Amino acid sequence: MLRARHLIDTSDLTLKELEEIFDLAHQIMANPKEFSHLCEDKILATLFYEPSTRTRFSFEAAMLRLGGKIIGFSEPNSSSVSKGESIADTTRTVGCYADIIVMRHPKEGAPKVASMYSDVPIINAGDGGHQHPTQTLTDLLTIKSIKGELSNLKIGCCGDLKFGRTVHSLIKTLSRFENNKFYLISPNELRIPEYVKGELNKNNIEYTEVEKLDDVIGDLDILYMTRVQRERFFNEEDYIRLKDSYILDIEKIKNAPEKMIILHPLPRVNEISIEVDDDPRACYFKQAQYGMYVRMALIVKLLGAK
Amino acid sequence: MLRARHLIDTSDLTLKELEEIFDLAHQIMANPKEFSHLCEDKILATLFYEPSTRTRFSFEAAMLRLGGKIIGFSEPNSSSVSKGESIADTTRTVGCYADIIVMRHPKEGAPKVASMYSDVPIINAGDGGHQHPTQTLTDLLTIKSIKGELSNLKIGCCGDLKFGRTVHSLIKTLSRFENNKFYLISPNELRIPEYVKGELNKNNIEYTEVEKLDDVIGDLDILYMTRVQRERFFNEEDYIRLKDSYILDIEKIKNAPEKMIILHPLPRVNEISIEVDDDPRACYFKQAQYGMYVRMALIVKLLGAK
Amino acid sequence: MLRARHLIDTSDLTLKELEEIFDLAHQIMANPKEFSHLCEDKILATLFYEPSTRTRFSFEAAMLRLGGKIIGFSEPNSSSVSKGESIADTTRTVGCYADIIVMRHPKEGAPKVASMYSDVPIINAGDGGHQHPTQTLTDLLTIKSIKGELSNLKIGCCGDLKFGRTVHSLIKTLSRFENNKFYLISPNELRIPEYVKGELNKNNIEYTEVEKLDDVIGDLDILYMTRVQRERFFNEEDYIRLKDSYILDIEKIKNAPEKMIILHPLPRVNEISIEVDDDPRACYFKQAQYGMYVRMALIVKLLGAK
C-alpha cells in the first residue's frame, strides 16, 4: 500500500514508494501470468476530458493484463460534462461504478479536485501543462531497468524545455536521487523556466544550459528528446522557425557514447529521424512498454491488491 | 425469468416481477462474489444514439461485475447510422454479436421498434422524453432499501414536473403500490401534465399540487428533486427565470423530517446545494450505486442466467 | 499457424489456409465453450481511422468470445493522429500494449505499411476502396456452410460493381476455386472494372455481364446484392438516378431457384425490400453471424493460439 490514496503529482510518492513500485513492475515483467487475475473483480474508469490514445491504451492494457475491467470515455463530447456537472459530482458518481479512476483533463488541478471528493483512488493522467506523473514513472522505470540505477547519471534533456511538463517533472524527480547531473539543451526561446532552475540551485544539483546538442552529446548517459508541440506555441510563425532546430539524426549520434540511451515520451513528429530507430541506443519504444508495466504496478499498489 | 423478453416500459413488469428484481438486487449486494462469473459467456451491447455517460457506465459496470463482456458505441457519429441503416437492421445485426442490447435513443419508440425485430433482449435506456425504465427501477430499489417498503409513503416531487419523464414514470409506478401519497411541487409553468393527473384520479391516488417546497417539506418521507434541464425549454428566457426557483439548501431542509430521504436522478446542476451533500438525508449518490445493482439484477433476469 | 503473420489481402492466404480457417470456424461454432478461454491473456486493439460499427463489433465480439480483451478507438478524433504521428509509430507503440491489431483506414495501403513495422499481427479491416479481406472470408464461410462447397457455383453479383470492393474481392477469391461461373448484373455506369475482367479472362473463368437481374436470377446458386454507396459517387444526381435500379423485392425473387441464397455485406439501405427478409433464401443476417465466427478463427490462427 502507498501512503497516499491517489497519485496526482510524482512528489506524492516517497523515494521508498517509488522503489517499491519499480520492484513490483519488475516482478510483473518477470512473471506476468502470476498477476493476470489479481484485479479480476475490479473496474478501472478512464475519464479522458481530452483525447490521449497512447496514455489511455497504456492504462487500459495495464488493467486488462491484471484481469481487471474497463469503463470510460475518450473525449468530452460523449460525457455528461455538457450537462454542466461538476468534477466533484462526476467523480463521486463514477466512484459508485468503478474501483479506481484515471483522469486526463485540460484544466490544471482537475484531478486534484477529483481526489478531494473521491472514495476511490484517482490517478492523474495529465492535467493541462501541469503534471503527468505516470509519464515520469515510465521514464524512471525505463532508466532503472536499462541503466540499473537512478543515481550517478548524466542526463541530457533536449528540445522544448519551456513548455514540456514531461521534462520538468523528470528533472524534479531525478533530482531526488543522488549525484545526477543535467544538461539542458534548448534554443534560447525555449529554455527551462526559472522556477525549475531555482529548485535545482536550492538543492545544489549540478546542471548546465547549452544551445548545441553536439557540444554535450559525448558526455551523456541519457538523452531525453522532446517533441516541439504545436499546441503549446503562441503563434504558428515561432513554431515553424523553431521546430526543426533540434532533430536527432544518424549524424548527431555518431559522437554519442555507446551506452547512452535515447528516450522520448512519444508521439514524435520529426525530432528523431526514423533512421535512428534501428540504433541500439534508441529505447523509446521499449519505454512505451515499460509504461504499461509501471502502470500495472501502480494500479496494484493503489488498489492494495498486493 | 420475466414474462416479457424486453424492458421497454416499467409497466412491462408485474408487481411480482418488480419485487423479484429487487430481491435479486439485494442478494447481489449481499454476495457480489457469488454473481461475479454468472454471465461470463455473455456480451452486452450498448447502443447509445445520444450520449449518456452515467447510464452507460452503470450498465457497463453492471455487466462487467457479472463477469460479462461489453461492446458498444457512445454516440451516433461513430456508428453505422450515418449510412442510413434502419433500427431494425442494426438491431438484428448487433444481435448476431451480442446476447443483450441496451439502447438509448433520442426518438421516442425506437427501443420498442428494436424489440419487435430482435432475437435478443432489448433494454430501453431512455428514448427521448418518453421512458427510462431503469431509472425508475433505480429509484424504487433505493426507496425500498432505505425505507424498507414501497407502500405507505409520502412522496414529494419537486422541480420540473412538466418535462421530467423520470418523475412521471416514478409516480406511475409508485401508484401501483398501496397507500402512497404524492406532493407535486413546481412552478405553475412546469406543473405535472394532465394525463398523469388523470391516471392518479382514475386510480384514486391521493395527491396535492403546491408551489412552495417549504409548505410541505415537513410532511415528506421522500423528497425527489429534479434538474431543470436546459434542453427541455422552448426558450432561454424561461429557463433563466425559472431555473433557480426550486433550489434545495441547508435552510430549506431544516424543516424536513429527520427520516426523510432526498433523491435525485443526477446529474444535478445547482438544484441541490453542495452543502446538502453532507446531510445524512442526502441519498442521491447511494442511489447511483443502487442503480448499478438493479441493472445487474435486470440483466440476470432477462438473460435467464438465474 | 498461417504462413503470413498478417492479413492484409485475401491473396495472402493459400487455398489450404482458407480451408483451415473455415474448418476452425466450424469447430468453434460446434463447441464455442471449448474456445471461450483460449485467448485469455491476449489483447486485441481496434484502430478504426474511420468508423465502421459493424466490422468493429464483429471483431470485438470475436475476441471477447475467445476470452480475450479489447482496447481501441472507433474514430480518428479520439486518437493521437491529430498530433501528426506516423502509422508506423502508432503501430509500434500499440504493439507494446496489444497482441494483435485490427486496422480500418480511409487510405489504401495503410494497413500494409503498419504490417511492415509491426511486431504483432495486423488485420486489415478495410482500407479505402481497396481491400476488406475479412468480409470476403465472411462471404466464403457463409457460402461453404450453407451450400456445402466453394466450387461448382453460379454466382450473381448485383448492383454497384464498379466501386464495390467487396464484390471485386469475392470474385477474385471464388475464382481460385474450381468451376465457378459469375453473372455480373449492373447498370452500364456501374459495370465491373476492366482489371477484374482481365483477371477472369486470364484464368479462363466463365462470366457474363447483364443489365437485368430478371434475365439471370433463375440460374443462380448465389445472389450477392450490394449497396449503392452514396459516398462512392462523384455527384448526388448520379446517385439519385441509379440508386433504385437494382432493388430486390418479392416480385423479383419469384423466379429464383428454391435453393438460391441471397447475401449482402450490410448495411443495406433499400436495395433489398424488408419483405424479402422472411424468405428462407435470405441469408444476410446469418452472414453477419458467420462473420464473427470466421474472425474468431482468424484471430486464433494469427495468434498461433491453436
Image (cartoon, coloured by chain):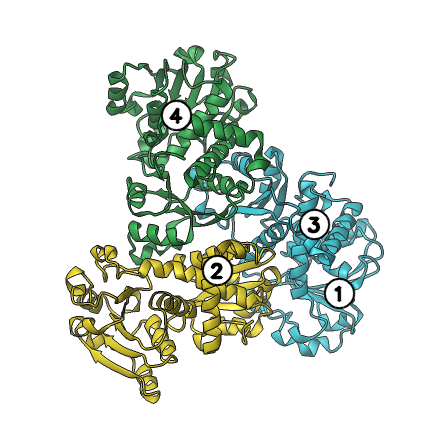
Chain colours: A yellow, B cyan, C green
| Front residue (pair C230, C295) | C295
Q: Nearer the viewer, mark 4 or mark 2?
A: 2
Q: Which residue is mark 4?
A: C16
- Left or right: residue A294 compared with residue B96: left
Q: CA distance from mark 3 to mark 2?
A: 36 Å
- Residue C243 versus residue A65: which sits nearer the camera? A65
Task: Give the total of numbered labels.
Answer: 4
- Is label 4 in contact with label 3 (beta carbons under 8 Å)? no
Name the side, left or right, on which A107 lies relative to B47: left
In the depicted structure, whether residue B105 falls above or below residue B252: above
Residue labelled with disc 3 = B297
Distance (Cα) linking label 4 and label 2: 40 Å
Q: CA distance from mark 1 to mark 4?
A: 69 Å
Which image quadrant is residue A69 in? Answer: bottom right
Secondary structure of the residue carrying numbered label 3: helix
Q: Tell us which disc is closer to us: 1 or 4.
A: 4
Residue C242 quadrant:
top left
Give the residue type at disc 3.
Answer: Ala
Q: Are marks 2 and 1 on the same chain?
A: no
Q: Amino acid at mark 1?
A: Ile
Disc nearer the start of the sequence (1/3):
1
Task: Say which residue label 2 marks.
Answer: A28
